């Protein structure tokens, strides 16, 4: 499988279809619910799992090497800025983890066009955007000034 | 054949691939080109596309110049040492001097970077790596890129580049198709930046069943970054320098944090340390390189391989001690959950708790890429202020085709860029592309209608081939007139595995094997004309396969050309088992002539600019 979708939870909204980097989450024309059409191209990246508003997607480890009976589930909460994980081993042991995902509000990044336009002198230099300031070092952007050598190190 | 709508998109700068290199390219292109139209085209959705789709737990390239931790010169020495002497030091120095500003931008945007409670500095995992809570690394970076780009086109697979009508060696745009609507897209652009990632599924993966997608590099890394430039005749470099990774078994979970931060070690099946005992035999093969610090990645692989061949496998990571510390246990697990969730799935399924069991390691199948401990990719011009003349023919990060730039996995000669360095390289290319466009003046590139109309026919052909062929048979996947993309992929992987140094031959090859490999690849390439696709999704798979086959052919020619074993542990030339600095301390360069369907090979000197 890798990912699979629970029939009773999925409402066919298509968020998983939109996000899957492998283009393998599709809406089944008959059931009108999502299905992984190519499990052997699934990376178990969980992008769809994280994106599903109904928590309808789960993962069953690759059948050709993962024994059954386990689960690895997550809940990604953008407003709280966290992701929580619950791992269940085949023998029933459980582990929980929580990590932060972002330190600033979603959508808050200042657009590059909101910065004042750079000068011609900056354009002609080797500096990139926000340099040298963002390097946080004295003396500006390092420049190589030594002599060239050729041959074996 | 169904009539396909053609949609034209004009831009100044076209960025192909919205991963780390592409997002950096979009950001910088617009920073310097406020009046310019910057378009990003991505085959998936930039929110979660590329190698960082599931997040990362570390930024593997950060100098820490603000605290005097490393200098760009140190970084070049590290790259050079790890790649057995052969790197583009001019390009590496350039990444090193800029990368810190990239990381500081990421932090400002909201990426949680861990800090060392004692020093207040970023928490180091190792000399070059800093630790992050990077589950949302890609969405954060994509937010910045989306705001920078004039337009982002998701779900469009780019299949070919378009060349200028008047100047043969100048790029003028790209074509592709929308994987959802099936519309044909013609992108007309003054400059193109390729940032389409590396290549998995060139060589046969260990798992060929349901788990074939659990490769180390993402299954969607489909070699477009190489095929697109190769077809234009752009020079490629070090394509033989494929990488093999030592990783946790089956899930390919990363080991960096274990070695560097948790300070775990490896042992053979009998609990013995084994690396040191192979040192003298490695020295016989490669000379003094084995005595460099840290031991080059490929040579550590080599010791692993020899120990297993000697019948003392499996090799295990000794985790039991470290995992008694609850803090380290959390790091160990979160490291997977943050970037290779499949490994946590494998361990949960197998009841492997590293507190109680020392988990097995494995050596992966080979991958072709340019941003990790390897540096395959396109040959690019270096920075204007110091690159040697031979490495400088135009604009920074421009390939040997005018107006065609690259970043990240796309460009060769610069290993150890990782996420931050790939983004940085995109930034460098974005600024340089602006310079290139400003200098064009009235001499603007123009696409040829005939060229893109011909490509339009070719691109959709697999749908037609399938439609016609499907009526010939009752049911099933076996047809005398078409080849399904999956069958073609499996054929490619088998050829590369058996003849070009895959895991199946223990990474061994030689001239007769490579010669046979090329014959088989040629027939496969011919058979690509018979690909059959039952859907737009399979049409995407068809073009991914095309790109993989083209890149594979290039890899094979390069492997044939370099008559030495430069990176034991990545691959071996049985007919040239020694490292040979006298004849091969050089870069290998290829260029493909599409009309003649021929590769030509040459060498280029390695200039060492840092002591
Ligand atoms: C398991 C794993 C662990 C890693 N760990 C770390 C780490 O800890 N720290 C670190 O810094 N780095 C790490 N890396 C490396 C890092 O992810 C890469 O170096 C970086 O993503 C390379 O950037 P890129 O832009 O070249 O490729 P990508 O980020 O892969 O982007 C390529 C983009 O191009 C798109 N594309 C491909 N073909 C086409 C086409 N034909 N048309 C349109 N779009 C296309 C893809 O969909 C993708 O979005 C890791 C990678 C992996 C896989
Ligand atoms: S995101 Fe969830 S609910 Fe929506 S289609 Fe996918 S599986 Fe169904
Ligand atoms: S886990 Fe990733 S690759 Fe698999 S279906 Fe979900 S989004 Fe696609």
Image (cartoon, coloured by chain):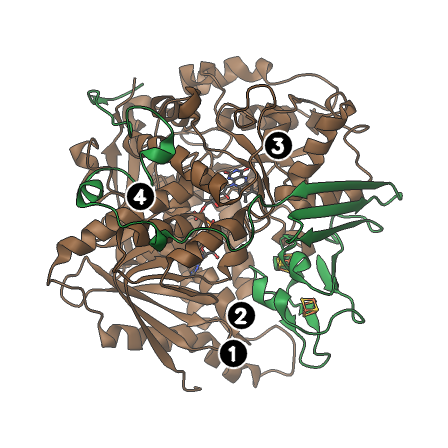
Chain colours: A green, B brown
Quadrant that contains the C terminus of chain B = top left
Q: Is residue B202 above or below residue B131?
A: below
Please give the residue where the numbered disc 4 appears in the rendered image.
B428
Residues behind callouts 3 and 2 on a single chain: yes
Q: Is residue B399 visible?
A: no
Between A11 and A29, the residue placed more toward the observer is: A11
- Earlier residue among tags 1 and 4: 4
**Residue B376: x, y in percent?**
39, 41
| 3D distance between C-alphas at marks 4 and 3 | 30 Å
Q: Is residue B308 above or below residue B538?
A: above
Mark 4: few/some/many CA within 10 Å (<14, 14-19, 20+): many
Give the residue at the far right of this rendering: A92
| 3D distance between C-alphas at marks 3 and 1 | 44 Å
Q: Chain of mark 2?
A: B
Name the mark nearer the viewer: 4 or 3.
4
**Residue B334: x, y in percent?**
68, 38
For residue B125, side relative to residue B542 (left or right): right
- Residue B466's disc number: 1
Please give the residue where the numbered disc 3 appears in the rendered image.
B255
| 3D distance between C-alphas at marks 1 and 2 | 10 Å
Looking at the rendered structure, the secondary structure element under dot 1 is helix
Between B243 and A84, the residue placed more toward the observer is: A84
Name the mark nearer the viewer: 4 or 2.
4
Mark 2: few/some/many CA within 10 Å (<14, 14-19, 20+): many
Q: Chain of mark 1?
A: B
Q: Is residue B291 above or below residue B447?
A: above
Please give the residue where the numbered disc 2 appears in the rendered image.
B538
């Amino acid at each position: 499988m890798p990912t699979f979708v629970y029939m009773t939870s999925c409402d066919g909204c298509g968020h998983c279809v939109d996000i899957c980097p492998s283009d393998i989450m599709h809406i089944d024309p008959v059931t009108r619910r999502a299905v992984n059409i190519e499990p052997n191209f699934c990376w178990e990246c969980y992008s769809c799992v994280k994106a599903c508003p109904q928590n309808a997607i789960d993962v069953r480890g690759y059948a050709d090497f993962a024994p059954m009976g386990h689960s690895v589930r997550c809940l990604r909460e953008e407003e709280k800025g966290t992701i929580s994980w619950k791992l269940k081993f085949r023998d029933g042991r459980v582990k929980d983890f929580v990590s932060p995902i972002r330190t600033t509000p979603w959508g808050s990044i200042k657009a590059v066009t909101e910065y004042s336009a750079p000068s011609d002198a900056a354009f002609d230099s080797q500096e990139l955007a926000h340099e040298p300031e963002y390097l946080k070092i004295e003396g500006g952007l390092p420049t190589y000034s030594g002599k060239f050598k050729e041959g074996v190190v | 054949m169904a009539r396909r709508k053609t949609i034209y998109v004009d831009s100044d700068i076209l960025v192909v691939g919205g991963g780390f290199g592409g997002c950096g390219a979009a950001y910088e292109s617009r920073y310097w080109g406020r009046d310019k139209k910057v378009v990003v085209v991505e085959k998936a959705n930039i929110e979660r596309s590329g190698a960082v789709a599931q997040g990362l737990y570390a930024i593997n390239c950060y100098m820490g110049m603000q605290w005097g931790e490393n200098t760009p010169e140190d970084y070049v020495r590290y790259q050079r040492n790890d790649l057995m002497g052969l790197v583009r030091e001019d390009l590496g120095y350039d990444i090193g001097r800029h990368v810190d500003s990239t990381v500081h931008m990421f932090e400002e945007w909201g990426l949680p970077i861990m800090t060392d409670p004692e020093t207040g500095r970023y928490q180091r995992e190792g000399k070059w790596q800093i630790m992050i809570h990077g589950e949302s690394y890609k969405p954060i970076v994509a937010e910045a890129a989306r705001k920078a780009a004039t337009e982002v086109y998701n779900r469009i697979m780019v299949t070919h580049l378009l060349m200028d009508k008047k100047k043969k060696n100048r790029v003028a745009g790209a074509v592709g198709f929308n994987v959802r609507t099936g519309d044909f897209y013609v992108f007309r652009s003054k400059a193109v930046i390729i940032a389409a990632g590396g290549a998995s599924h060139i060589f046969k993966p260990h798992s060929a069943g349901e788990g074939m997608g659990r490769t180390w590099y993402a299954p969607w890394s489909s070699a477009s970054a190489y095929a697109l430039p190769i077809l234009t005749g752009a020079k490629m470099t070090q394509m033989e320098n494929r990488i093999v990774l030592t990783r946790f078994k089956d899930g390919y979970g990363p080991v960096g944090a274990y070695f560097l931060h948790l300070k775990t070690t490896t042992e053979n099946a009998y609990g013995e340390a084994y690396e040191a005992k192979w040192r003298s035999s490695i020295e016989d093969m490669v000379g003094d390189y084995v005595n460099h610090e840290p031991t080059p990645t490929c040579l550590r692989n080599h010791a692993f391989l020899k120990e297993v061949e000697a019948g003392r496998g499996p090799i295990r990571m000794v985790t039991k001690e470290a995992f008694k510390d609850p803090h380290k246990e959390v790091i160990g697990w979160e490291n997977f959950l943050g970037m290779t969730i499949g490994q946590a799935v494998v361990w949960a399924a197998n009841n492997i708790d590293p507190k109680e069991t020392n988990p097995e390691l494995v050596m992966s199948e080979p991958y072709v890429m340019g941003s990790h401990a390897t540096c395959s990719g396109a040959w690019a011009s270096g920075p204007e202020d110091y690159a040697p003349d031979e490495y400088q023919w135009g604009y920074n990060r421009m390939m040997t085709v005018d107006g065609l730039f690259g970043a990240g996995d796309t460009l060769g000669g610069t290993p150890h860029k990782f996420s931050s360095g790939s983004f940085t390289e995109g930034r460098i290319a974005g600024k340089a592309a602006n310079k290139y466009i400003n200098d064009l003046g009235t001499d603007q590139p123009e696409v040829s209608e005939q060229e893109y109309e011909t490509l339009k026919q070719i691109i959709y052909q697999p749908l037609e081939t399938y439609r016609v062929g499907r009526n010939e048979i009752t049911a099933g996947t076996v047809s005398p007139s078409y080849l399904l993309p999956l069958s073609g992929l499996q054929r490619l992987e088998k050829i590369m595995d058996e003849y070009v140094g895959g895991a199946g031959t223990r990474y061994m090859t030689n001239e007769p094997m490579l010669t046979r490999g090329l014959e088989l690849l040629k027939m496969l390439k011919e058979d690509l004309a018979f690909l059959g696709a039952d859907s737009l999704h399979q049409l995407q798979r068809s073009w991914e396969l095309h790109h993989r086959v083209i890149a594979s052919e290039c890899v094979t020619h390069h492997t044939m050309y370099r008559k030495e074993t430069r990176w034991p542990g990545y691959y071996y030339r049985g007919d040239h088992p020694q490292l040979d600095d006298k004849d091969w301390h050089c870069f290998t360069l290829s260029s493909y002539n599409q009309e003649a369907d021929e590769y030509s090979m040459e060498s280029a000197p390695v200039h060492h600019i840092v002591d």
